[in-house]
Amino acid sequence: MTKDQGQKTKIAVLGVGRWGQNLVRNLAQQPRVRVVALVDRNLERLQEVRDRLSLSPDLVLATDWAEIRELAGLEAIVVATPATTHYPLIADALGLGYHVLAEKPLTLDPQECWQLAEKAKEHQVQLMVDHTYLFHPGVEAGQKAIASGRLGRLRYGYATRTNLGPVRYDVDALWDLAIHDLCIFNYWLGAVPEMVAARGQNWLPNNQGLADTVWLTLTYPGGFTATIHVSWLNPDKQRRLAVVGSEGTLVFDELQSDAPLQVRQGHFQAAEGYFLPQGIGVEKLEIGTAEPLRQVCDRFVTAIATNTPSFSSGALAADLVRVLQGAQLSLQQGGVAIALDSWGEGV
């Protein structure tokens, strides 16, 4: 059943930390949405967010989900709480018939992801996950460039995602940061890794032993290998990902504001025992300017209005979480490669 296009969707946001506030801002600017409640354990932060974003004085502020779980007229919730709290909150909301948009990762267990996906289907509501980069114009354009075959035969990929913070206390850098690049590689390649290996380091004191720096290796069907380096404590901020092919390399660099997506062209030609570079050049690819998180919120509202699932679904989340869970096992075992096709039967 589709929703009346002229009727605003009443949404509550759970968690107004750094990312939750970004979600509130985008939802408040969405013409088809009415934010009716905010939930966070910090009442002062709730009040500050309400006032700074000039939200309705009728907005309900609550410090616990139980206070608003049966709020009159509520239709959907956005979950931006720590990942460890996601499963019970989302399962409860889906059971009450609410649509749900959840911050990544959906949960820390692929079986729980599948259970939530099935629960959404059972209650005929939408479950969408905020894998923000799937809605980035540069990532969308990059996928089209690879699909066109212009890179030739794909060989390998690499990514770096570093900065001085922000540090999380519910998951390590693997779950916090590597999920972005894993998501992009999966989307660009149209595949899921079959093997994963990870090594990590914990340099920050008093952070529950969570790895703040991780090196991850993904092996895809056909032998394509991608390496990912993520860190919370490297002031050399980088947001760079590349796929190397026989005819050139596709580079997505968010910090290059003038040309974040490029094809670096070039190949070798053998001549008298030497390899001579040929066809050297750089092509800047045009991309849109839409804010990715705005796109996420728009697609969520459209999914509700049309009762049509988003491609950033619970099933997609389960694939990502399964790879990350395998990487976590490898991390715990000092970098041992984990074959995902044989590990975790039944997931």
Image (cartoon, rainbow, N blue to C red):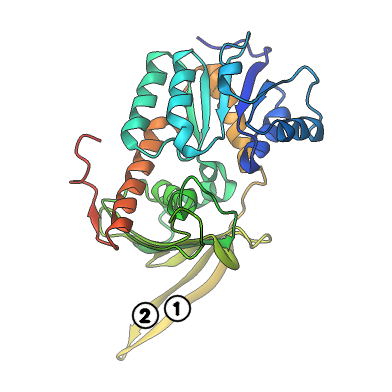
Q: Position of residue 110 (x, y in %)?
A: 33, 36
- Quarter of the picture containing the C terminus is top left
Instruction: Determine whether, in the image, residue 265 is placed left or right of residue 30.
Output: left
| Residue 68 visible in the picture | no
Residue on which disc 1 sits: 278
Query: What is the three-letter code of the residue carrying label 1?
Result: Gln
Q: Position of residue 112 (x, y in %)?
A: 35, 31
Q: Earlier in the sequence, mark 2 or mark 1?
A: 2
Crowding at dot 2, Cα within 10 Å, few <14 / some 14-19 / many 20+, comes out as few
The residue drawn where x is 74% and y is 34% is 44
Query: What is the three-letter code of the residue carrying label 2?
Result: Gln
Instruction: Determine whether, in the image, residue 285 is placed left or right of residue 53.
Output: left
The residue drawn where x is 59% and y is 24% is 64
Q: Which mark is residue 269?
A: 2
Q: Quadrant of residue 60?
A: top right
In depth, the one of 88 and 282 nearer the eye is: 88
Say which element carries label 1. Answer: strand
Instruction: Determine whether, in the image, residue 305 is placed left or right of residue 96.
Output: right
Query: Against 6, is 11 above or below?
Result: below
